[in-house]
Every structure is written in C-alpha cells, then in structure tokens.
Image (cartoon, helix red, strand yellow):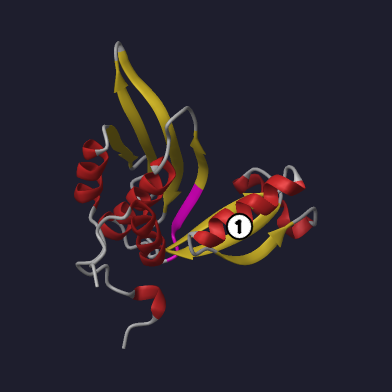
Amino acid sequence: MSSPLSLPTGPELPTLAQLEAEAERRGLLLRLKVGRPLGVLWSLRVVVARRQAGGLQLLGELKGWALPLAAGLRLDTMRVQGEDTAGVGALIWAATFAWALEATPCRRALLLAIRDHEAQHRRLVRYFSQLGFRPLRALEAGAGDLAPRLLWGGAGLLMEGDCNEGLRRSARRLRIGLSQG
C-alpha cells in the first residue's frame, strides 16, 4: 500500500516534456538549468520567458537545490514579474515538481515563507498552502534556529509539500494534464 507521500505520478500528471510543450503553445519558453556542483547535490533554476524583438523577456524564475533524499528538494527564490504573466507561476511550480519526480528521488519539498513583513508573510503562507505545503515549524531568533536561518536567509515559517500534490495542483491551475472525468 502506498503512503500519500509516495504516490506514483500516474498518467494524469503532466511530464516535464508536456509542460515545455504547453509553455510553447502559450507563446512562452520554459527552461530548466540543472547542475551537479558537488556530484551529489543538484542545483536548479527554472525560468519562463517570452520571445520578443531583440531577445527574451524574463517573466519568472525559481531557484532551488536537491539532495538525493525523499525529502531532499529545497526551494529558495521564486518570483514572477512583468505584464501578462497569467499562469507563469503555476508553470514554474509544475515544472519544478515534474523535474523532481522525473530526475531525482525527491518526493517532498521544503521552503521558507519568509517573515520580512507580516502582511507579505501571511500572503506567502496562503499561497504556499494553496500549492499543498504544510507548516513544519517557525524559524525565529533562538540559538537553535541560527543554522537554518543562515541556510534559508531569514526568519519565517518552514513548510513542507508533496511533489505529486504540488504538480497536481499546479497542473489544475494550468488546466492541463489531468484526466477529464
């Protein structure tokens, strides 16, 4: 019996190749830059851009890294910018989760909903919760939180999400890859 955190991706979830094709259909370019700087660790940068006269316009990106562990995906910086960016965030998230499921043993992801400003923090927690992330623990000013705060770049709420669920929710937002029923 499979646990909820190790569900197979199944045919109803889009592959990375299908997501790249969907981006192209929308007039966008989806690219992943993956490195193995230490042989064990993956570095990841996911970008979505639009072709325009004279080059590309960056619309969004996500940076992260992964260890070869079930809970090894760490997501750091995610941003969407510019005009006409509907679906860009969902495309970035879907590609990130699809990559993790296809190319790594990672099945769970960690991220920090940073607490720079309280209103922004609440928006981040709500946004990440909609992707299926759940709170793990708060990183505050205590001595025990110093190392994780240095790693994540600040205080906030550490959250964990399932890659299958994140891909499912992102694909639903994009209205692609899910069985019609």
Mark 1 surroundings within 10 Å by alpha-carbon count, few (fewer than 14), some (14 through 19), many (20 or more)? some
Q: What percent of the width, then of the height, locates residue 163?
A: 39, 62
Judge by depth and name the residue closer to the eye, 53 or 92: 53
Residue at point 40% right, 40% down?
A: 88
Q: Residue at x 64, y 51 (%)?
A: 123
Residue located at (71% from left, 50% from top): 155
Residue 176: horizontal and vertical position, in percent?
27, 55
Q: How many marks?
A: 1
The reply to whether the magenta stretch includes residue 72 is: yes
The residue that label 1 is drawn on is: 126
Residue plotted at (35% across, 74% down): 6
93 horizontally vs 128: left or right: left
Q: 2 and 150: which one is in front? A: 2
**Does residue 2 appear to the left or right of 141 in the view shown?**
left
Quadrant including the N terminus: bottom left
Whether residue 147 can be seen here: no
Q: Which residues are magenta?
A: 71-75
Q: Which residue sits furthest front?
A: 181
For the residue pair 156 and 122, the one nearer the viewer reads as: 122
Quadrant of the rendered image containing residue 45: top left
Q: In terms of secondary structure, what is the magenta stretch mainly?
A: strand
